[in-house]
Each structure stands twice: as structure tokens, then as C-alpha cells.
């Protein structure tokens, strides 16, 4: 399987990022830039062709490009991010993706962050969070259900995005932080997939990037990494400590398109 990834450089204004569930701890922007470069190299190492979007230094959260689009096999959906401060990011994402695939766009009153959309096969699980509203869920369903996708609502709690709480790490296997999913949402995943819980000492460890038989995982969660490796999953760890201060994680920093 081949992959394309779209990334955006760290903004000079990163320290002014939006925060919801973590306390403000000013990131070292220079270190964040170096960490992001290492992350991009990890994508390349796992087989991605990487496209770099224009820098948006006036947009503090612009490195978290995942939130500005949802990519499925047939097209890209440009989102309307839940934080008003982030909506200016979407135009350049649209321009970049339109060179590679058909593009459609959400409109008000919908809000939806890409971090709230977990795609597993032909199912899109959509987090109901502070950043994604019912109109966002409904518009996404209208756009992709005619293409053969199921769109399933998932209630989150005490976390920014659905993919803070759950990501696919192998075929039929989902890494979860159960405390951040409503009981019904957790049961919905458990009825379909094998669930692996993060180590209790690492509550933020559920976010991973899966590329084939490998995942990218933050290097600050060694106990959860060990659980993944015990499942014979190849894990490539990266240091994203400064991006984590901006409430980011590894999925946030890329948009990935899979193709056979």
C-alpha cells in the first residue's frame, strides 16, 4: 500500500495555540520545529510521499493540519474547525488537496475537527466533542454516505478529540483510553474490534498514526508502546513533547491518503 501525507510547518506563533484540556506550558518553538522534522522523516521512513503545505505563521495551530480536512478514497472534505481562530487555515489545505483529488467543503453552522474522525475501513467514527457539533456530523454523513461509508456518532468525555481516546493500531485492533469515551461509545468499539487499553500511568497514549503494519507513537509512553510491541506491531517512536504542550499528538500533524 502506498501513502501520501500532507504536513504544515510549525508556526512561529505556536505559543498562542488554543488549549482546552491541558494547562498552558509555553512550547519551545525551535525545538518543536526540530521535532516536527523528525516526525516528517518518520512518515517517509514508513512509506509516505510527503507534501508540505505553506507555513501559516499567524495561525498558531496550523501545524495540526489534520483538523482541516477528512480524506476518504474518493475525495477530501474540507472541514469547518470548531475553534473560530483556526478557520483561516482551511483555504490553503483545500488548494493543496485539490491538486490531487476532488474536494468538497463544509459550511456553517457545521463545525468539525478532523481529529474527531476515526476512519476504520468504510466506517467513520465521529466524536461528539466541544469542537464537533451535530451539524458537522450530519454534513459529513451527507457527503460520504452516498459513497458507501457509515458515519457513526461517538460521545467523548474529558478530552479534545475522539482520536485522543482511540486509534486503530492494526487490522481489527484499536488502542483506547476508556476513561475518555462514553460507555456506549466504548461498547460500540468493543463489539467490532479487539480493544487494547493504554497503560494506566500513560493516560494520553492512545493517539497513534497507523501506516500498514507499523505505527508512529510518542516516545514518552514506553509502557503503552510495550503493549503494542507485545502484539507484534512495529512501533516507531518520536519525541513530540513541545507539540504536546500545544495539545497536539501524532495524528494531528498530518493528513494521510491511502492508495492500493
Image: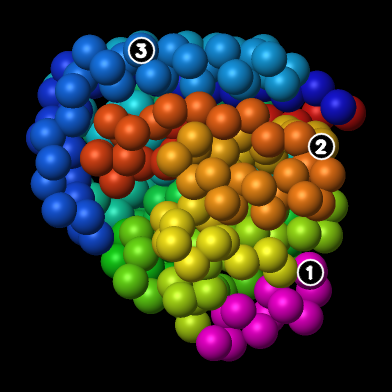
Position of the N terminus by quadrant: top right
- Secondary structure, mark 1, is loop
Indicate whether residue 33 is drawn in magenta: no
* Residue 63 quadrant: top left
**Whole-Å distance between the Cαs marked 2 and 1?**
16 Å
Q: Is residue 103 visible?
A: no
- Label 2 crowding class (10 Å Cα cut-off): few <14, some 14-19, many 20+? few
Indicate whether residue 192 is drawn in magenta: yes
| Position of 239 relative to 152 (above/below) | above
Camera-nearest label, 3 or 1: 3
| Position of 154 relative to 166 (above/below) | below
In percent of the image, x 18 and y 45: which residue is there? 18
Looking at the image, tell me whether mark 3 or mark 1 is earlier in sequence order: 3
Q: How is the image coloured?
A: rainbow
Left or right of 257 in this view: 223 = left
Q: Position of residue 237 (x, y in %)?
A: 57, 31
Which residue position holds label 3?
34
**Whole-Å distance between the Cαs marked 3 and 2?**
26 Å
Which residue position holds label 2?
213
Looking at the image, tell me whether mark 3 or mark 2 is earlier in sequence order: 3
In percent of the image, x 56 and y 61: which residue is there? 198
Which residue position holds label 1?
193
Q: Nearer the viewer, residue 196 or 78?
A: 196
* Residue 214 quadrant: top right
Left or right of 56 in this view: 42 = right
Q: Position of residue 95 (x, y in %)?
A: 46, 20
Q: Which residues are magenta?
A: 183-194
Amino acid at each position: 500500500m502506498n501513502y501520501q501525507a500532507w504536513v504544515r510547518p510549525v508556526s512561529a506563533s505556536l505559543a498562542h495555540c488554543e488549549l482546552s484540556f491541558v494547562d498552558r506550558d509555553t512550547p519551545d518553538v525551535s525545538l518543536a520545529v526540530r521535532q516536527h522534522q523528525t516526525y516528517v522523516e518518520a512518515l517517509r521512513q514508513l512509506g509516505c510521499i510527503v507534501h508540505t503545505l505553506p507555513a501559516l505563521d499567524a495561525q498558531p495551530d496550523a501545524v495540526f493540519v489534520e483538523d482541516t480536512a477528512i480524506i476518504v478514497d474518493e475525495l477530501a472534505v474540507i472541514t469547518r474547525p470548531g475553534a473560530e481562530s483556526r478557520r483561516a487555515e482551511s483555504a490553503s489545505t483545500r488548494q493543496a488537496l485539490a491538486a490531487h483529488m476532488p474536494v468538497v467543503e463544509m459550511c456553517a453552522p457545521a463545525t468539525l475537527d478532523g481529529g474527531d474522525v476515526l476512519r476504520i475501513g468504510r466506517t467513520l467514527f465521529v466524536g461528539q466533542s466541544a469542537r464537533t457539533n451535530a451539524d458537522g456530523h450530519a454534513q459529513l454523513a451527507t457527503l460520504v454516505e452516498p459513497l458507501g461509508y457509515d458515519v457513526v456518532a461517538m460521545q467523548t468525555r474529558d478530552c479534545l478529540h475522539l482520536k485522543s481516546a482511540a486509534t486503530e493500531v492494526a487490522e481489527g485492533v484499536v488502542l483506547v483510553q476508556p476513561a475518555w469515551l462514553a460507555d456506549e461509545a466504548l461498547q460500540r468499539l468493543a463489539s467490532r474490534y479487539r480493544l487494547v487499553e493504554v497503560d494506566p500511568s500513560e493516560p494520553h497514549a492512545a493517539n497513534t498514526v497507523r501506516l500498514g503494519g507499523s505505527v508512529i507513537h510518542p516516545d514518552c509512553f514506553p509502557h503503552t508502546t510495550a503493549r503494542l510491541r507485545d502484539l507484534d506491531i512495529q512501533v516507531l517512536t518520536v519525541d513530540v513533547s513541545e507539540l504536546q504542550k500545544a495539545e497536539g499528538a501524532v495524528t494531528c500533524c498530518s493528513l494521510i491518503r491511502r492508495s492500493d
